[in-house]
């Protein structure tokens, strides 16, 4: 059972942060929320019956654990700097954003100067997993610090894996994002191929989902692609940002990752066309175009 004496604050109430906050509230752990757009935080605070912090430091002063979920490295570092005046050695910061491992290491360094604990803990499982509290959580940091955070993690996730020191969580998330790119490429390309062959796509989904090609992405996004619908899920522009991180990490090893490189090209085209806020399954648009332009 969660330790309900722990007070958790959530910073960043987007597609992933808001449902994580709701699950923390259900577990009796959520005490406060903050978001750059104040109205969003105020609305969620009223819904959940928790405080709406005036700024990150205010949230930190009234919470034992601060969970952050923001989009970009620079934004996260700015939030950390705003948090620091409200932090001390008894508090813990958990970051669930997707950033460069080097950014996580830098945050740990800044927080260590005031004795505050830190875990980089990116998550996977999509908006569905965030809503259902079934996220996979990839944790970098001290194992004893992880135990302090366990009740928080158990409220938002189903699988919690300690991957090693700070930065290891983000490196593991990079692995996840590379795989997601490959799966997205394979599924969208295969369905575009099936469409070009004149096959009934609903039946294609049914039969291949039950065989060796079955996967989460096909199951959760296949029907929408067939209907030409790409609702808000994992934004294509955010995956593009994550793959740029993967590309930078690979460059440190002196290698290029073909799947990552090609996906970045495809995503860039879609973003220019105005589809960056759609789910990554919008790659199906690009694959369809590949077949129709040959006719």
Image: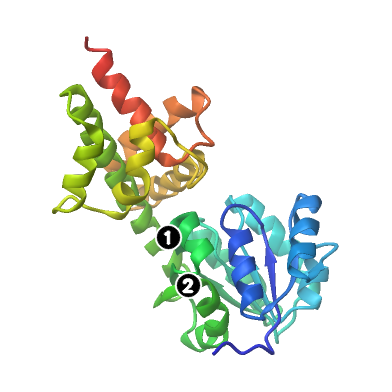
Question: Is residue 68 visible from the viewing direction of this image?
Answer: yes
Task: Point out the residue furthest to the right here.
Answer: 54
SS label for mark 1? loop
SS label for mark 2? strand
Classed neighbour count for the residue bearing mark 1: other residues with Cα under 10 Å, few (<14), some (14–19), many (≥20): some
Left or right, 139 with reference to 14: left
Classed neighbour count for the residue bearing mark 2: other residues with Cα under 10 Å, few (<14), some (14–19), many (≥20): many
Q: CA distance from mark 2 to mark 1?
A: 9 Å
Asked if 198 appears above or below 72 in the picture, the reply is above
Q: Residue at x 22, y 9 (%)?
A: 295
Q: Position of residue 182 (x, y in %)?
A: 28, 45
Q: Position of residue 114 (x, y in %)?
A: 71, 79
- Residue that carries the numbered disc 1 in the rendered image: 125
Left or right, 88 with reference to 246: right
Question: What mark, if any, has residue 178 been given in the picture?
Answer: none
Mark 2 / mark 1, whichever is N-terminal: 1
Nearer-the-camera pick, 235 or 249:
235
Question: What mark, if any, has residue 157 been given in the picture?
Answer: 2
Asked if 103 appears above or below 224 in the picture, the reply is below
| Figure coloring | rainbow
Q: Position of residue 177 (x, y in %)?
A: 38, 52
Q: Residue at x 56, y 57 (%)?
A: 16
Q: Are marks 2 and 1 in contact (CB under 8 Å)?
A: yes
Q: Which of the image's four quarters has the N terminus?
A: bottom right
Q: Residue at x 39, y 39 (%)?
A: 224
């Amino acid at each position: 059972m969660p330790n309900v004496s722990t007070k958790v604050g959530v910073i960043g109430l987007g597609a992933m942060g808001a449902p994580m906050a709701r699950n923390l509230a259900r577990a009796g752990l959520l005490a406060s929320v903050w978001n750059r757009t104040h109205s969003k935080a105020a609305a969620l605070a009223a819904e959940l019956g928790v405080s709406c912090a005036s700024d990150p430091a205010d949230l930190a002063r009234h919470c034992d654990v601060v969970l952050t979920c923001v989009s970009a490295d620079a934004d996260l570092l700015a939030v950390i700097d705003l948090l620091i005046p409200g932090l001390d050695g008894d508090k813990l910061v958990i970051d669930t954003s997707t950033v460069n491992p080097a950014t996580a290491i830098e945050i740990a360094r800044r927080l260590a100067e005031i004795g505050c604990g830190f875990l980089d803990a990116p998550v996977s499982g999509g908006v569905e997993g965030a809503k259902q509290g079934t996220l996979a959580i990839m944790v970098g940091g001290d194992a004893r610090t992880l135990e302090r955070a366990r009740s928080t993690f158990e409220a938002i996730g189903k699988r919690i894996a300690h991957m090693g020191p700070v930065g290891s969580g983000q490196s593991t998330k990079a692995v996840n994002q590379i795989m997601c790119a490959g799966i997205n490429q394979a599924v969208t390309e295969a369905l575009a191929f099936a469409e070009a062959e004149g096959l009934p796509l609903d039946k294609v989904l049914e039969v291949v989902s039950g065989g060796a090609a079955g996967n989460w992405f096909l199951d959760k996004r296949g029907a929408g692609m067939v209907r030409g619908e790409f609702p808000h899920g994992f934004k294509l522009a955010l995956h593009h940002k994550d793959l740029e991180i993967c590309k930078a990490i690979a460059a440190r090893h002196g290698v290029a990752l073909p799947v990552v490189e090609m996906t970045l090209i495809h995503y860039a085209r879609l973003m220019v066309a105005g589809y960056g806020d759609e789910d990554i399954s919008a790659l199906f648009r690009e694959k369809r175009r590949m077949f129709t332009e040959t006719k």
